[in-house]
């Protein structure tokens, strides 16, 4: 009887014991473990020497803290920077490499569920099609004693810069002389005839 009671107690304990399952704390999958990097230009109507805003935002919706986040932005030589703002917990540096302007950005630390943005105001000094490129974003992710290197890709942007001036249509070659001749005939000839009739009507008859 006592032995049967022990078996029954053991089976009862198995029924109420929580079922073991893997911990979700260190899972690196799902929407709660993403890092995003986005470059944005705020104005789509861009003209020569017209200031525009550009920003790069790093968002961390991760279980880990991020450190030593670095990236660089490459601008064409026609670009001129007016002003820039350091990112939160970071700094930037500007230099010219070859024919391109290079801006390096370092963000020292980014906590969980937070973001940091680098922004600048600049202008293009010539019209045409241009691209602004950005390097791979490198970083270090830390959770407790665990430390890993990581990287995130960010897409660049393409710009179409207009002159901002109203263009005067140029007639096809060969049509210019014809248009001038027609203008002379339509303007000068009536004036000449009017003067002739006026003075001709005032002549005295002998």
Image (spheres, helix red, strand yellow):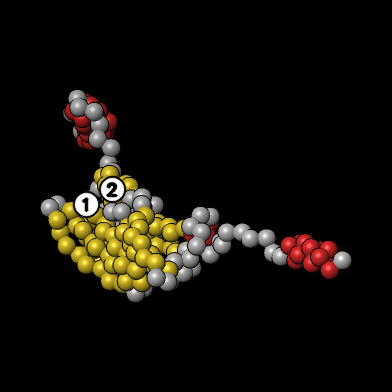
Question: Residue pushed farthest bottom?
Answer: 89
Classify 199 as above or below 76.
above
Residue for point 53% across, 56% down: 31
Q: Can residue 85 be seen from the camera position used here?
A: no
Residue ranking furthest to the left: 98
Residue 162 location (% of width, % of height): 30, 48
| Residue located at (24% from left, 54% from top) | 74
| Residue 199 vertical position relative to residue 85 in the rendered view, above or below | above
Residue 13 lies in what quarter of the image? bottom right
Q: Secondary structure at mark 2?
A: strand
Q: Which residue is mark 1?
A: 76
Q: Is the residue marked by circle 1 packed among few (<14), some (14-19), or many (20+) residues within 10 Å?
A: some
Q: Residue furthest right?
A: 1
Rendering coords of residue 9 (x, y %) = 79, 67
- Report the residue marked by disc 2: 131
Q: In which quadrant will I find the N terminus? A: bottom right
């Amino acid at each position: 009887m006592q032995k049967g009671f022990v078996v029954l107690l053991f089976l009862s304990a198995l029924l109420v014991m929580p079922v073991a399952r893997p911990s979700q704390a260190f899972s690196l999958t799902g929407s709660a473990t993403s890092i995003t990097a986005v470059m944005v230009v705020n104005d789509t109507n861009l003209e020569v020497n017209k200031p525009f805003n550009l920003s790069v935002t790093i968002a961390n919706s991760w279980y880990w803290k991020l450190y030593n986040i670095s990236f660089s932005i490459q601008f064409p030589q026609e670009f001129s920077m007016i002003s820039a703002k350091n990112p939160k917990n970071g700094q930037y540096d500007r230099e010219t490499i070859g024919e391109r302007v290079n801006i390096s950005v370092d963000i020292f630390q980014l906590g969980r569920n937070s973001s940091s943005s680098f922004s600048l105001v600049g202008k293009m000094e010539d019209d045409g099609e241009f691209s602004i490129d950005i390097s791979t974003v490198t970083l270090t992710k830390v959770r407790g004693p665990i430390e890993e290197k990581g990287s995130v890709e960010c897409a660049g942007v393409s710009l179409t810069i207009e002159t901002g001036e109203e263009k005067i249509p140029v007639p096809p070659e060969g049509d210019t002389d014809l248009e001038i001749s027609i203008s002379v005939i339509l303007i000068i000839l009536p004036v000449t005839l009017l003067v002739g009739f006026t003075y001709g009507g005032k002549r005295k008859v002998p």
